[in-house]
Amino acid sequence: MKARSVSEAVERIPEEASLMIGGFMGVGTPERLIDELVRQGKRGLTVIANDTAMPGRGIGKLISAGLVARTIVSHIGLNPETQKQMIAGTLAVDLVPQGTLIERIRAAGHGLGGVLTPTGVGTLVEEGKQVIEVDGRAYLLEIALRADFALVHAMMADYFGNLRYALTARNFNPVIALAADTCIATADHIVPVGVIPPDDVMTPAPVVDVLVANS
Amino acid sequence: MEPQIIIARRIALELRDHMLVNLGIGIPTLVANFVPKDLHVYFQSENGLIGTGPVPEEGMAHPMLTDAGGRSVGALPGACTFDSAFSFGLIRGGHVDMTVLGGLQVDQHGRLANWMIPGKMVPGMGGAMDLVTGAKRVVVAMQHTARSAPKIVKRLTLPLTSMRPIDLLVTELATIGFPDGRATLLETAPGVDVATVIAATEAELIIADGIREMPT
């Protein structure tokens, strides 16, 4: 693992890239990568995440800076700026049930074509999707969802890139880490190898491509 | 008593020892304030926590310990944390014993609309569709009417949350169950008579034999 500066890490991300970003209402979001995306002005991004946080926090900063063209999320209720851009037609918003969204991402990361879920059957979510019956129960076929980059935030990373998350800041992070071509991680603490006990490693080093160095 | 408190106290009586319970934002969150003293209830926050505890004292909040609304919370002894895929595995997989959610409309068969008002309010469904589809028991907490317009209706005019009907509806006026898929008045709030409930309800209400006063 070679640690990169935050500017080098973000230089690898082209405009119009698709990004999966960890965090739940901004908790567990790699803020340094977000700030650097705004500083470098990467435009036309597709953002796949649980939510768009709120203005001034996490993904909310990308939305407010006008860098996001499309977002696939489960909730935008606490970010009026997302709603404003959606109504103005400058931001495409795909709303997906939270359990379906994370499972589509998990499917991609685990090499599956998709999943069958009962969630959304008979609702607006069903539109345009295949309904498959298994043992007499109806399920929607929800296809796998991948991205170019996964941007994750951990509480702790060791020099190899093993990651450990804290409390509710884990959320989407370990799942998106597997579902993108390149996984870029930030951490609150970078520690020597061995400090994170094997049982506590939540994302193993081989799936982390870039660790952002302390500045 | 305020309507929200009447509703939250009544729903708290549905809690049983060792239940795993998910509380939505708004009135449902208040249910945690009225857990009967002798019960141990596990509260799940779908952002990845079982054992959600009271909001910590000023200055004691941890920025990485929050509920599904992003608010700082505490964690009770025995709490555990996990990722979102696991969290929704618990929900869809039928491991959550009870979920309490807010509602915009409930129809006379117990079907719920609670995630959007087309053209007006499009916050996204978050975890609501998974919770209603997967939890063992679904309880809805909502005010009986919205600016005197009925919310308990014959037919939903707002988008459905899930085909799965709810099990219990508690408002500040009444407790309504759905045996055999038909809205049935079970309890009226103290000081509220049956005629008042019927007048505030558009749905056809079956009146149960031996209606009780809502315990609070």
Image (tube, rainbow, N blue to C red):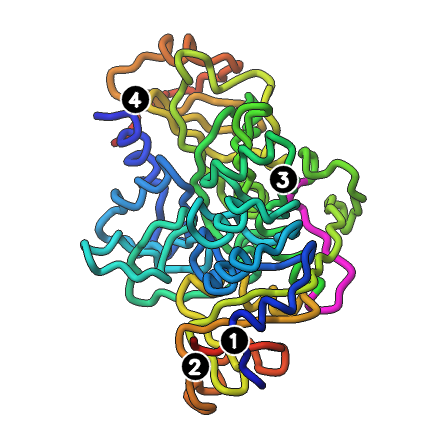
Q: What is the number of callouts on the image?
A: 4
Question: Pointer 4: residues within 10 angstroms few (<14), some, or many (20+)?
Answer: many
Q: Which of marks 1 and 2 is nearer the N terminus?
A: 1
Segment colored magenta: A109-120
Residue linked to disc 1:
A5
Q: What residue type is labelled 4?
A: Ala
- Nearest the viewer among A88 and B185 is A88
Instruction: Give the Cα separation between the discs numbered 2 and 4.
Output: 57 Å
Residue linked to disc 2:
A190
Residue linked to disc 4:
B189
Q: Which amino acid does label 3 sit on?
A: Leu
Residue A114 magenta: yes
Question: Pointer 3: residues within 10 angstroms few (<14), some, or many (20+)?
Answer: many
Label 1 vs label 2, nearer the camera: 1
Do dots 1 and 4 share one subunit? no
Q: Quadrant of the C terminus of chain A?
A: bottom left
Q: Residue A133 carries which label?
A: none
- Res B31 seen here: yes
**Chain to which the residue tagged by mark 1 belongs:** A
- Nearest the viewer among A91 and A112 is A91
Q: Residue A199, how many percent across, how many down?
A: 48, 83
Instruction: Give the Cα separation between the discs numbered 1 and 2.
Output: 13 Å
Question: Pointer 2: residues within 10 angstroms few (<14), some, or many (20+)?
Answer: many
- Nearest the viewer among B166 and A25 is A25
Instruction: Give the Cα separation between the discs numbered 3 and 1.
Output: 30 Å
Q: Which mark is residue A91?
A: 3
Label 3 vs label 4, nearer the camera: 3
Label 1 vs label 4, nearer the camera: 1
Label 2 vs label 4, nearer the camera: 2
Q: Residue A14, how many percent across, how many down?
A: 68, 61
Label 4 secondary element: loop
Label 1 secondary element: loop
